Image (cartoon, rainbow, N blue to C red):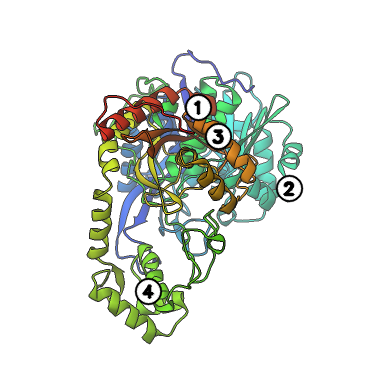
Amino acid sequence: MTATGPRNAPDVVDVVALGESMVTFLPSRPGRLADVPSFDRAIGGAESNVACVLAAAGHSARWISSVGADGFGDHLVETIGAYGVDVTAVRRDPARPTGVYFRTAGDRATDAHEVAYYRAGSAASAMTAGNVDLTAARAGRVLHLTGITAALSGECRGLLHELTAPRPGRPLVSFDVNHRPGLWPDDDDPRVLLELARGADLVFVGADEAEEAWGLHGTEAVRRALPGPATLVVKQGGHGVTVFDAGHVTFVPAPRVDVVAAVGAGDAFAAGFLSATLRALPMKARLRHGHLWAAAALTAPGDLAVPPPATAPPRRAPARPAPGHRPSWSGRAAPRLDRTRRPPRRPRRRRVGETSTRPRLDASRGGHRGGTHPMSQTVDRALSILPLLAEGPADLGQVADRLGVHKSTALRLLRTLHEHGLVYRQSDQRYRLGARLFALAQEAMENLDIREIAHPHLARLNERCGHTVHLAVYEEGEVLYIDKVESRYPVRMYSRIGKPVAITVAAVAKLLLADLPEPERRTIAERLEYPLYTARSTPNPPAFLRELTKVREQGWATDLGGHEESINCVAAPIRGADGRVVAAMSVSAPNVVVTADELLTLLPQVRRTADDISGEYSGRTSAKDTVRP
C-alpha cells in the first residue's frame, strides 16, 4: 500500500498542494451570466481546495502558487491562510494579474452551465522550476498536483515534469488528472497528462476523463495504461470508485446524496482519500473517507464544505511555515466552511396518467384506493397542479403544458384553487402553493398525537447516534412517515414526511403489518406488488409472510439493503394501551457511514426508545411486547 513521505522531519507538513487558485464569482440567483444581476465573491482552485479542506480537518497543509500583486491576490492569500494553510511560499508577481472566473449556478455537466475564465497570462501561468520554491514544495509527506496546472503554460508543464521526475527521498506524489480540454492551447494534453500520471505514486482519474483523453474504456484498461503508480484511483461517477493497489482491486459504491452543487466534489474526494492515506487506514476506509468528504461538497453550494466530523483526524497545530520563510498570517478568524442546510430534494413528479412505480395495494383486486369508479377528470387535473407547484412557482403556460390542456382550462382550475386558498397568484403572474394548504397540512399533523409524543424521544436518540430517525404509521393500505429527525452526516437516506415507504421491504412497514391479524396479513400480502429494488428485496407473498411471522415473534425488524443496497435500517414497534402496534420507529444509515453490523448494535437503544414512547402514549411506565395469535 502506498506510503507517504517522512512524518517528523523538520519543516515537513502533511500535504503540499501546488497550483493556481482564482477568485470565483458565484451568481446571486440562477440564470445565464447575461441575466445575473450580482455575484458573491469566493475562492476556487483544485489544489487550494484540497489544502483548505485538509487544514480544516486538522492536517498541516501548505499551498504553493503565484498570484498578482493586486487586491484579488491579497484576498486569495488571506482567505486560504485563514483556513490554517501555510501560504508563505506563495509568490507575488507584480507584472501579472491574479486569475478570476465567473460561473452560473447550474451543474457543470449540463448544457446550461456557463463559466467565464479570465486567467490567460495570470501570475500562476508563469510558474517555473526556477521561480517556485522547490524545497518548500518537497517538504511534505504528500505533494498534490493536478493536470490543470500543466494546461496553464509550457513553463508550468516543465515545473510539473520536474516535480514528478524520479528523485531520492521525494514525497509521495499525488496527481489528479483533472482533464479540462478547454484550457489546453493545443492537442498535446493526452500525451502530457499520461506522462505526468506515470510519474506519480498516487493517481486520481475519472473513467470519463480516461475515455475522453486516452480513449480507454473500463477500469482495467486504465490500469494497463498506468501500470507504474503504486495506487490508481478510478472514479466511476455515481457508480462508485475502483482502486488498484499492491496487486489488489477494491471497489466501493458511491452513496446517494441530494446534490446542491457538483463543483468541488472531486477535490473533496481527493482530500478525504489523502487524509485516510496519511493515517495509513485500510483501503476501504480511504474510499469511504473520499466518498463522505465528496458528499459534504455535493451538499454545499460553494467549492468548499466541512468534512464529516466522524472522518476527521485529531486536531493539530497550524502548518509550519515553509523553510526559509517567516509567517505572515492575516490575523483574521478562519472562515467557516459552508454548513448551509441543503434544500430538500425535489423528486421527479408524475404527469397525469403516469403510473406510480412504488408498491401499493392493487385497486383492481379490492384494495383500499381507487375502487371501481374512476376519479373525476376535473378533480384529477386540479389535484395534479399541486405537486407541480410544490416544485416551485409556475406560470399559466407551464401548468397547461403539464396537464396537457388548453390555457383556458388551466386558468379555470387555478382560479378555483385560488378561491379556496390552495394556490396563490404572485405579482409576476406565476402561481405558488397557498397558505391554506399549509394550514390544513399543519392541522392534520398536529392531530397526530403519536407524533407529538414521540418527537422528543426521536430527537434524543438522534443526538446520541447521529443517524436519521423516522416515525411511521399504517393508514389506508399504506405506511407513511409522519416524523423525521435528520442525520448529522452529509451522506444520508433520502425520505420525506408524508411519503409512503416501500411497503414490502421497509423495516417500519414489516412491524406495522406483522401486528395485523393473520387473515388480514395474508390478504394484504396477496394484493401487494413486489418490486425487486435490490437482490435482497422481498420477492413474493410467501416470502413476505414468512418475514412478517419472524418480525412478529422477535418484536423488531430490519431492512438491510432491501430497498437501496447502500442503506440499512433497524426498527422497533410503538404500542398503545391495548398492546396493539400504533406506530413504528427506525434508525437508518448508509453503509459508508456505518456498516450493517455496527447499525445493529443500536437496536437496544432503538427498542428502549420505542418502549419509552409506548409508555408515554399509553399512560403506562413501560411497553410490553404482546404477541397475539
Q: Position of residue 209 (x, y in %)?
A: 63, 48
Q: Earlier in the sequence, mark 1 or mark 2?
A: 2
The label number, if any, that marks residue 152 in the structure image: none
Q: Residue 211 in the image: x percent, y percent?
A: 69, 50
Q: What residue is disc 2 on? A: 216
Q: CA distance from mark 4 to mark 2?
A: 51 Å
Reply above or below: 167 against 424.
above
Out of 295 and 370, give the one closest to the viewer. Answer: 370
User: Which residue position is annotated with label 4?
Assistant: 382
Q: Nearer the viewer, mark 1 or mark 4?
A: 1
Give whichever of discs 1 and 4 has the lower sequence position.
4
Q: Residues within 10 Å of mark 4 (few under 14, many from 20)?
A: some
Q: Amino acid at mark 2?
A: Leu
Element marked by disc 1: helix
564 or 205: nearer the viewer: 564
**Does dot 2 land on a helix, a strand or a loop?**
loop
The residue shown at (37%, 26%) is: 624
Q: Which mark is residue 549?
A: 3
Image position of 600 (left or right of 342): right
Q: Please state which amino acid type lies under the numbered disc 4.
A: Ala
The amino acid on which the numbered mark 3 sits, given as a three-letter code, is Thr
Closest to the observer, 550 or 212: 550
